[in-house]
Image (cartoon, helix red, strand yellow):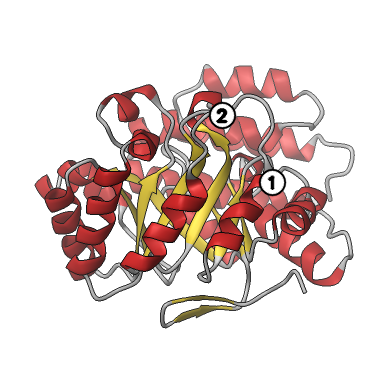
Amino acid sequence: MLNKKINIGPISLDMNVFLAPMTGVSDMAFRRLVKRMGAGLVVSEMIASQAMIRQTRQSMRMIQAHGEEPMVVQLAGCEPEVMAEAARLNEDLGAKIIDINMGCPVKKVVNGHAGSALMRDENLATRIIEATVNAVKIPVTLKMRTGWDDKSRNAPKLAKIAEDLGIQMITVHGRTRCQLYNGRSDWQFIRQVKDAVKIPVIGNGDVVTVEDAKNLLALSGADGVMIGRGSYGRPWFINQAYQYIATGSYPDDPPLGEQLAIVLEHFEAILDLYGTEGGVKIARKHLGWYSKGLKNSAEFRVNINQNECPIKMRGIVTNFYAQQPEFA
């Protein structure tokens, strides 16, 4: 069966389709919405361990949780002691799972010897995993890529090392770091990671349709799916993918009237989280994603991007949806 239960240490999850950690996207406002609409697990944005220890305003906002239990915090860093301290701090603040980032391909992170750069240094990666696992009583998971490049796809080896050190679940994005987000995610390679360990393995990368989610599981043998960019503007998509995996039926998108209510709820949550000025700027990208595929969406995005008044923006959103042929 493809709709498996997932056990992360003592934590049992009934649904095996998760929301990926995405910087600038999977904040509390989006996580809470996705979780409520039926995701097995949602993960915080990647947080730099140094910033976490300093308890910067931004890092503390990134770990806020409401309605998204169990709270999962993803940490990035290159110093074992700092990662351990950041993990302890988050455990004290209520985190139920710590996720170690060894998959981020962004130049700024990699140049700091964190994220997917750690896949090039198995010794340092081992020390970070060991220090983090030993620092907390809650489960620790790991997210990685298949390797640094095509000549060093060492994810199966690192996965086995991680399992032996106490990691409770591994997520694999089916690209190397050097691919960034180009090419296709290699779902079949993920099977090599699954074969190397006994703990749950989650597949990630290029899941933008419900069929993709089912095909990833079939090709990889993974226990679950983690969806990132496929959820842009579709907080309901995580649950649609799960329903398709579990039943084989094709779930419809919510009616446009329901979508409007979801969009406005998300907009208000963003303003609450970031304040009016910062919230408006962040909301624009989400509103653009929500409008994709709808009539006159290009004009809508221009209007939204030229407006800074939340009251006027609400009106623009409401009118845009009300003018759709299928709106009811």
Binning the other alpha carbons within 10 Å of mark 2 as few (below 14), some (14 to 19) or many (20 upward) gives: few
Q: Would you place residue 271 above or below residue 213 in this image?
A: above
* Location of the N terminus (image quadrant): bottom right
Decide if residue 256 is in sight here: yes
Between 308 and 119, the one nearer to me in the picture: 119
Q: Is residue 241 left or right of residue 45?
A: right
Between 26 and 188, the one nearer to me in the picture: 188
Q: Mark 1: which amino acid?
A: Trp
Q: Would you place residue 38 above or below residue 187 in this image?
A: below
Q: Mark 2: which amino acid?
A: Asp
Q: Secondary structure at mark 2?
A: loop
Which residue in the structure is indicated by mark 2?
150
Q: Secondary structure at mark 1?
A: helix
Q: Residue at x 72, y 42 (%)?
A: 208
Q: Residue at x 17, y 42 (%)?
A: 51
Between 186 and 261, the one nearer to me in the picture: 186
Which residue in the structure is indicated by mark 1?
187
Between 254 and 261, the one nearer to me in the picture: 254
